Amino acid sequence: MLQEYLKRHWIRVLVSLFILSVFLVHALKWHEWEIIDRFDSIAYDIRLRLTMPETSDDRIVIVEIDEKSLAAQGRWPWPRDKVARLVDQLMDHYGVALVAFDVVFAEPEEASALALLDELTGDLAANDRALQQRYEQLRPRYDHDSALVESLDGRNVILGVFFTGGGDSGGSETAGAPPTPLFPRGSFTGRNIPFVTASGYAANLAQLQEKAFATGHLMALPDTDGLVRRVPMLYEYDGNFYESLSMSVARNVLGVKGVVPGYPDESRSGRGYSELEWLEIGDRRIPVDARVSALIPYRGHKGSFSYVSATDVITGSAPASLLEGRIVLVGATAAGLLDLRATPVQGDYPGVEVHANMITGILDGTIKENPAYTLGAEFLLVLLSGLLMALLLPVLSPILSGVMTLVLLGSIVTANLLVWQYANFVFPLAASVLTVLTLFLFNMWYAYFFEARGKRKLAGLFGEYIPPELVEEMSQNPESYTLESHNRELTVLFSDVRDFTSISEGLGAGELSELMNAYLSAMTRVIYDHRGTVDKYIGDAIMAFWGAPIDDPNHPRNALYSALRMVSQVRVLSKEFRERGWPELHIGIGINTSDMNVGNMGSSFRRAYTVLGDGVNLASRLEGLTKSYGVSIIVSRATRDAVPALAYRELDRVRVKGRDKPVSIYEPLGPRDAVDKKLRDELDFYREAVKLYRAQNWELAELQFVNLSKRSPKRALYKLYIERINHFRNNPPPADWDGVYTHLEK
């Protein structure tokens, strides 16, 4: 079987494996295809937007430097004494827990009043003691930097620092005094960790840095598409490592001084693996990727946190209940201040709210995990799904291929979403999905362009059994059909011309041939019109079946309606034959529905597409019984049950020759709504007569059948039962007789 499979499909399998190898190379990161990374980013964004809680976190309040504040307080940057006033208001008047600035104060304020005072008193103050004292009294009033220094002293205020030359563009320039690093030089020596590294910085003035409670960097790490999805938890500069503003705030809130790096044990990650996978802050764990960056757990669109205008804080008009005891982030949201970020959530998202989301994620433990060891899991998923597609698609029909592809894609996506939502884990999606889709499209393309010859061959094989329109239908999906023998439920029909021997004796050879051609052509057309397959002609007999090679869920119905039309068509033919001096035709038809064996069968010299089995033999016996019961069509119970839309007359329960198991047989009478009242009344009387017959109440049964025979003297069925009753009256059946009559002839 394997040899046959490879012989037929080796090209498709080989090309499919090549396509798979392309995705495996990406999964192993030997070479990353940008388009796959781009699709992964899109998939990440979709999952993020679908699962965002869209709820507010009232622990954090953003004091925004917005258009309203700029209009009321003047253009940015504000004088440092005004910033000091903001800090004083937040701490003293509103009683906030902590203030963190998404702002850097890297240069001294250029105060024109202070410069003028220094210039006016420069040389004079040295010679005039009174002027010197007055100068010393006035100078602090105009030294705004000192005012901010005093405001920061002893308070929970965290300042920010910018780094350049790393995730963002920039050179190696420096400004201000660098903060104390969280991890000093040498903390990660010997570890294979590709930190985001800076070549320059913009920090706060030394006197401000000295008074600040802590400092955190303000950097995000835009992806190649420019969207901000990550924040480096640690930034490296000159061998030292600096924490992010969000981690600094979280440490302050949790009362934790240090951060513990988390490394996986070798048993889980493999020998020699030394990547940093998480950072511990007390009992909180921040999962990080290979570059020690954390995914931003966006809560929703802009406004997931409460906003207060900075000018309302300065003037004291902001509601105290909104700020008291809260974590306050101060940042710019005005469009002209250029602190808006492109994010998966929104194109103009405030940078300060990025920090707010990160703080919430650290405190609540909602940051998604995306460790480096997902590389191995992604490789296995791509490999398994790719092999499944590459090996199975060549032998599946397009419909089954589509179903399999949809099921596989649905399983991959569903599992990915479950892991995302309930395990808080980001698993790559694009490579596996694109592998499945690419292999599906290739196989469909190959089947369409390179297997047309197979379609023509299919038409040649089945063209003599079924109508051309069904051959065309089959050729759309040739892989769905096979000549190999298999079992399936089918409906088989046998028809035979009554007294054909007498007919043939009364006609010459030419006339007989002409009559049979006309008869068989008409019957075949009826069968074809009802999607049947002509198995063979046996002299005047026809054998046909429904449900193969084309799957037909309505095969019992199509066979039955075909039989009714065949009987009707014979009446039309008989009229034509009488006009030509030929004898009238009468046919008998037997139909049965059951499991049968269908396929190409025969000998090494000749084979034919046919059906075999006990169900086929039963249909043949039913056709023979039509003579005994004086009806045109007899169907088995299985066929009757499958087509409830027709009305039936139960003829008998019988055992046919060569078959021990009894079967109920029926005569189809046509659509239920077409049965007139006279026939319905007759059927009611008939059913009562049969009940009496099976109960061995011979006298009453005979009386009923005699009355029925008087009503329909041409119906041979009633005379048959009267004869049986006379027989059983003299030769009673056993007391436990089941009403089954055994036929000893075919």
Image (cartoon, helix red, strand yellow):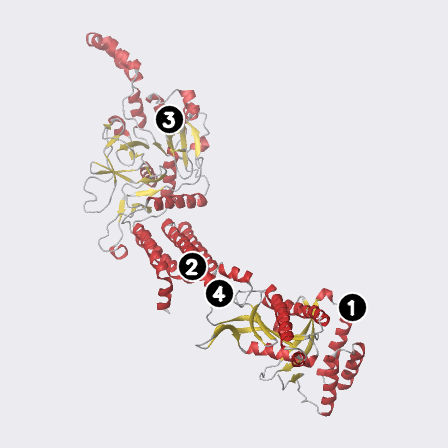
Residue at the spot of label 3: 337
Which is in the foreground here, disc 3 or disc 1?
1
The residue furthest bottom is 730
Q: Position of residue 34 (x, y in %)?
A: 33, 44
Rounded to the nearest angstrom, the CA distance separating label 3 from label 1 is 91 Å
Marks 4 and 3, the one that precedes in the sequence:
3
Q: Amino acid at mark 4?
A: Gly
Q: Disc 3 vs disc 2: Cβ atoms closer than 8 Å?
A: no
Marks 4 and 2, the one that precedes in the sequence:
2
Q: Position of residue 258 (x, y in %)?
A: 27, 42
| Residue appearing at x 40%, y 56% in the figure | 446
Regarding mark 2 in the picture, which secondary structure is present there?
A: loop
Residue 636 shows in the view = no
Rounded to the nearest angstrom, the CA distance separating label 4 from label 2 is 15 Å
Residue at the spot of label 4: 460
Front residue of 117/91: it is 117
Regarding mark 4 in the picture, which secondary structure is present there?
A: helix
The disc at residue 421 is none
Q: Amino acid at mark 3?
A: Leu
Marks 3 and 2, the one that precedes in the sequence:
3
Residue at the spot of label 1: 677
Residue at the spot of label 2: 451
